[in-house]
Structure formats: structure tokens, C-alpha cells
Amino acid sequence: MDIGFIGLGKMGFPMARRLIEAGHRLTVFDTQKAAVDRLTALGAKAGASPKDIADEVETVMASLPSLQASLEVATGQGGVIEGRKVKRFVDLSTVGSQMAMKIHGLLAARNIAQIDSPVSGGVGGAEKGTLAVMVSGPRADFEAVKAALGVIGKVFYIGEKPGSGQTMKLANNFLSATAMVATSEAVVMGVKSGLDPAVMIDVINAGSGMNTASRDKFPRSVLPRSFDFGFATGLMVKDVRLAVEEMRSLGLSMEVAEAVGRLWETIIREEGAESDFTAAIKPIEKAAGVIVGGKESHAAK
Ligand code: NAD
């Protein structure tokens, strides 16, 4: 099918590439020209703006880094909302249910359907087409894009209610964020007491503590101290803040989420928004006086 694709970053690029390889005709846009060039080299057409793309295709997908970027691309000046042909805006970004509902309302006034479609599974999942794709929105529009979304991962229809795909995604990412910091605390405790972190991770992965941080993030990016998993701390903190806001807006006070939220605020303050989110262990190491993994793995004397 003809698809517009806006936002060609760490996630957007591999998803767009897979769609081209599956035979879809893509028109792409990104504020960074180099990102567009990488896709035109693979056969995509370059669009001049979100509106320009929405003038040409019925389905526009987006994978953008902030709530503001999704709002602007969808509903701002020169945005998808001004397009003549567009019928549906499929947002693959994580924006939370409130922003999704805001975009839904603005687009509905112009008879454009908003489809939430946040994804989970990281850059590796985007490259392999194994993401979890959490879709909500009108059933008929979901059916129109289901096959294309199947190219990027396993598709789950969450429901008609706008924003419900986002609520699902925030529940998932709250767990991912928690696994990262909880595993960091567990391993730092062990190293402080003199345990070998590589052995600890092997044991955890053979035991009941196994989680996505111990299984994927520690072996690949923490123990070798490469801190290059491919998801920015700024994006993780965005998701944690959205999850805490979502809970509060439902009248809930969640103790683990509040504590995890505070810890991630320390991490972004100390490591910066651009750092890889696996650097979350660094403030925890610093407070404990230990280094986990690498050649210098040790507890402070
Ligand atoms: P990224 O920063 O690597 O890519 C975002 C791209 O959007 C960049 O190429 C940027 O130039 C472009 N962009 C920004 N503003 C724009 C605008 N106004 N118009 C057009 N292009 C614009 O981010 P990412 O890691 O690919 O994440 C994208 C989304 O996917 C985020 O919502 C993130 O939370 C979510 N996500 C990321 C991962 C991951 O592992 N990286 C996993 C799951 C979900």
C-alpha cells in the first residue's frame, strides 16, 4: 500500500526499511535530511512536509521523539491535518493516552482517524520485525493497516477507545524501566559484597529473577560497559513520567512507580537525556562506590 512515514530515527528507520522491503510504497519525511537520504537510497520517495505527504497518501505513520513533535506533525501548521487525501494517522510513538486523545479530537474534526500504535521491543525488534505493536482506534481503520503493521511486529488490537494502546504501552514500559533499575540495584548489592556480576547475571537468568534487563541489557550493554543499547535515557524518562501521570489521572497512587520515577529523575539529571538508558546503573554504582562489569569491576575497599 501507499504509506507516508514521518520520523526516521532509531526506530523509524528500520520500520520504514522493512515496509519498503515488504513491497509497500513509502513517501518519507524527517527534519534531518540525512535520515531522509538513507531511505530514498532504498527506494522511498521524499516528501516536503507532513502536509505534502498527507496530500498524496491515505495512511500516514509517524515515529517521533516527543509529545510536542507528534502534536505538531499531526495537527500543526503544515501538518498531516491539512492534507487532502489522508484518512488515518498511525502514531507509532509513545505519547501517553492524554496526548493521543488530544490528537484524536483535533483530527476527528477533519474526518481523519487517529490510530495509536506504540511499539515495544527496541531497535533490535524494529530491525527484525518482532516488535509488540499495540493498536487502538476505529476497527475499520485498524483492518486497513493491520497487514502493514504485521511487517514490523506482532499486532495486538487493544480496543476502539482512543489512547488505550498508549495505556498498554505505558504499563509495559513501566515494567521495563523498573526491571532496569531493580536489576542494577540487585547487581550493585552483589558487587559491593564481592560477587562477580557476570556470574550473578547467569544465575539470575537461570532463576526466578530473570527479566529483560538481566536477559538483554546487562549482557549486551552493562557488563561490557558499552552503554549502547539504543534507547535514550530521555525517552525512558518520558515514558516513566507518562506512566506516573497516567496512574495519577486515574486517581491511583502507586508506590513502586513513584519510587522508580524518582530514581529515573536522578538518572536523567546525572547522565543526561542523550545517554543510553542502560547508563541507569551509573548513579546507583556511584552511590554504592562500586563499578559493575568491564575490566575494573570491583567494590570500593
Ligand atoms: P529518535 O530520536 O532516534 O528518532 C526520532 C526521529 O524523528 C529523528 O530522526 C528526528 O529527526 C525526527 N523528528 C523529530 N521531530 C520531527 C518533526 N517535527 N518532523 C519530522 N521528523 C522529526 O527516536 P526513537 O528512539 O526512534 O524513538 C521514536 C519513538 O519510538 C519515541 O516515541 C520512543 O519513545 C518510541 N520507542 C523507542 C524505542 C527505542 O528502543 N528507541 C522503543 C520503543 C518505542
Image (cartoon, helix red, strand yellow):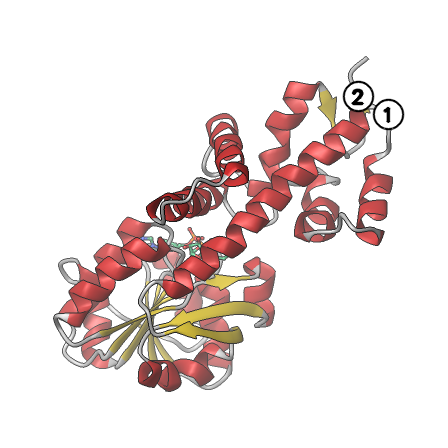
| Percent of width and height locating residue 63 | 39, 61
The quarter of the displayed image where residue 89 is located: bottom left
Residue 297 visible in this rendered orientation of the protein: no
| Percent of width and height locating residue 222 | 69, 40
**What is the secondary structure assignment of the residue under circle 2?**
strand
The residue sitting at 79% across, 23% down in the picture is 192
Q: Which amino acid lies under the numbered mark 1 shown in the image of this protein?
A: Gly
Instruction: Give neighbour class at mark 1: few <14, some 14-19, many 20+ (Cα, 10 Å).
Output: some
Label 1 beta carbon within 8 A of ligand 1: no
Q: Quadrant of the N terminus?
A: bottom left
Instruction: Name the residue carrying label 1.
Output: 194
Label 2 beta carbon within 8 A of ligand 1: no
The quarter of the displayed image where residue 251 is located: top left
Instruction: Name the residue carrying label 2.
Output: 299
- Answer above or below: position of 109 versus 202: below
**Left or right of 132 in this view: 146:** left
Q: Which amino acid lies under the numbered mark 2 shown in the image of this protein?
A: Ala
**Left or right of 181 in this view: 147:** left
- Answer above or below: position of 279 versus 156: above
Residue 91 visible in this rendered orientation of the protein: yes
**What is the secondary structure assignment of the residue under circle 1?**
loop
Of the numbered discs in the image, which one, if any, rests on residue 4?
none
**Left or right of 99 in this view: 221:** right
**Left or right of 17 in this view: 68:** left
Are the residues at dot 1 and dot 2 in contact (C-beta closer than 8 Å)? Answer: yes
Q: Quadrant of the C terminus?
A: top right
Of the numbered discs 1 and 2, the one sitting upstream in the chain is: 1
The residue sitting at 50% across, 84% down in the picture is 22
**Image quarter for ligand 1:** bottom left
The residue sitting at 26% across, 81% down in the picture is 58
